[in-house]
Amino acid sequence: VIPSESAELVVVTTNEATYFAEDKPNLEGVDVRVRSLTVGTTQRGTTDTNGTITFAELFEDFYEIVAQKKNHATFRKQIFLQAPGETYEAFLQYEAVSYVFSVV
C-alpha cells in the first residue's frame, strides 16, 4: 500500500449500557490505539464524554484498532481505512467479575 490520500478514522466506544440503558450512553474514558500494520506508526487517545475519538490525517492503510478500559474486555480489530474516512464501533464487553490465579 502506497500512502496517497489522507483519511479520518472515528471510533465510537460502546458496551451493554449503550443498548440497554434508557439514555443509551456511549463509553467515555476508553484508551484507544490505532497502529498502521504496514508502517508501524501509532496514534493514541482517550474517548470524550460522547464516547468518541477522531484520528485525523491518517493515510489509506491497514490498521489495528485496540480499545481498553478497566473492568471491560479489550476490543481489537484490523481494518483497511479508505479516504475520506470511516467510523467504527468498538464494543467493550463489561466484566463485572475477574479472577486471578496464583500458584504458591
Image (cartoon, rainbow, N blue to C red):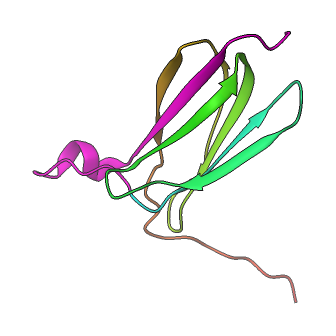
Confirm whether the magenta stretch covers residue 90.
no
Image: 57 above or below 23 = above
Quadrant in which the N terminus appears: top right
What's the magenta region?
1-27
Image: 68 above or below 71 = above
Q: Is residue 42 left or right of residue 8?
A: right
Quadrant in which the C terminus appears: bottom right
Q: Is residue 39 left or right of residue 97?
A: right
Q: Is residue 66 left or right of residue 19?
A: right
Inspect this view and state whether residue 65 appears: yes
**In percent of the image, x 70 and y 16: which residue is there?**
60
The x and y percentages for residue 90 are 49, 39
Inspect this view and state whether residue 74 appears: no
**In percent of the image, x 48 and y 28: which residue is there?**
88
The x and y percentages for residue 92 are 48, 48
Image: 72 above or below 50 = below
Considering every residue shown, the one lying at the far bottom of the view is 104
Asked where in the image residue 59 lies, by quadrant, the reply is top right
Nearer-the-camera pick, 85 or 91: 85
**In percent of the image, x 48 and y 33: which residue is there?**
10
Nearer-the-camera pick, 18 or 35: 35
Nearer-the-camera pick, 38 or 101: 38
**In percent of the image, x 83 and y 28: which residue is there?**
37
The x and y percentages for residue 55 are 58, 38
